[in-house]
């Protein structure tokens, strides 16, 4: 059975910086000053790999720096961690971060300009 292609979640912006609306309708509802012909931007939400923010090398380097700050040259070249131990720490960090540090933010890619039309505004919810 062929795998279905996931349609990326879209996100909209009135200023090409803050992409915080999940649809054009939501963007229009939140921005009363958008009229026919106004330019807005649509992009695709792109998930963040938060586990990539820290790895075993970062932790091991920090251990060495703190030990050097504490005892000086006696800690030079410490810790000497074998590759297997680095891989073990990487796996632990990735699992922990994935479990406890879920991102509520995202990157935006494939941004395109969109011109507001009269039809778009006709669908606007008015209070």
Image (cartoon, rainbow, N blue to C red):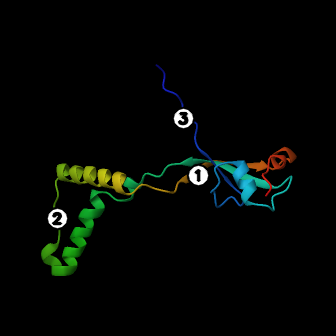
Question: CA–CA distance between discs 1 and 2?
Answer: 39 Å
* Left or right for 23, reference 94: right
Q: Quadrant of the C terminus?
A: bottom right
Residue bearing the label numbered 1: 108
Mark before the other along the chain sequence, 3 or 2: 3
Image point 62% across, 57% down: which residue? 20
Mark before the other along the chain sequence, 3 or 1: 3
- Quarter where residue 63 is shown: bottom left
Q: Secondary structure at mark 2?
A: loop
- Quarter where residue 69 is shown: bottom left
- Seen from the viewer's position, the closer of residues 27 and 89 is 27
**Position of 103 relative to 119 (above/below):** below
- Seen from the viewer's position, the closer of residues 18 and 21 is 21
Q: Which mark is residue 8?
A: none
Q: Secondary structure at mark 3?
A: loop
Q: Tell me, yes or no, whether the two marked residues, 3 and 2, touch with CB atoms within 8 Å.
A: no
Mark before the other along the chain sequence, 1 or 2: 2
Image coordinates for residue 106, horizontal then vertical, percent: 53, 54
Of marks 3 and 2, the one in the foreground: 3
- Seen from the viewer's position, the closer of residues 20 and 58 is 20
Of marks 1 and 2, the one in the foreground: 1
Image coordinates for residue 123, horizontal then vertical, percent: 80, 46
Pick out the residue farthest to the front: 127
Image point 81% across, 62% down: which residue? 33
**Position of 66 relative to 20 (above/below):** below
Mark 2 crowd level (few <14, some 14–19, many ≥20, 10 Å Cα): some
Residue bearing the label numbered 2: 79
Q: Tell me, yes or no, whether the two marked residues, 1 and 2, touch with CB atoms within 8 Å.
A: no
Residue bearing the label numbered 3: 6
Of marks 3 and 1, the one in the foreground: 3
Q: Secondary structure at mark 1?
A: strand
Image coordinates for residue 66, horizontal then vertical, percent: 23, 75
């Amino acid at each position: 059975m062929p795998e279905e292609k996931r349609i990326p979640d879209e996100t909209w912006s009135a200023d090409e910086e803050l992409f915080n609306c999940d649809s054009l309708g939501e963007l229009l509802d939140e921005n009363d000053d958008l009229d026919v012909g106004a330019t807005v931007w649509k992009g695709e939400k792109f998930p963040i790999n938060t586990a990539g923010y820290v790895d075993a090398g970062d932790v091991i380097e920090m251990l060495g720096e703190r030990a050097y700050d504490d005892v000086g040259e006696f800690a030079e070249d410490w810790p000497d961690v074998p590759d297997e131990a680095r891989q073990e720490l990487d796996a632990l960090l990735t699992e922990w971060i994935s479990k406890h540090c879920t991102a509520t933010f995202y990157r935006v890619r494939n941004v395109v300009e969109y011109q507001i039309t009269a039809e778009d505004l006709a669908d606007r919810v008015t209070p």
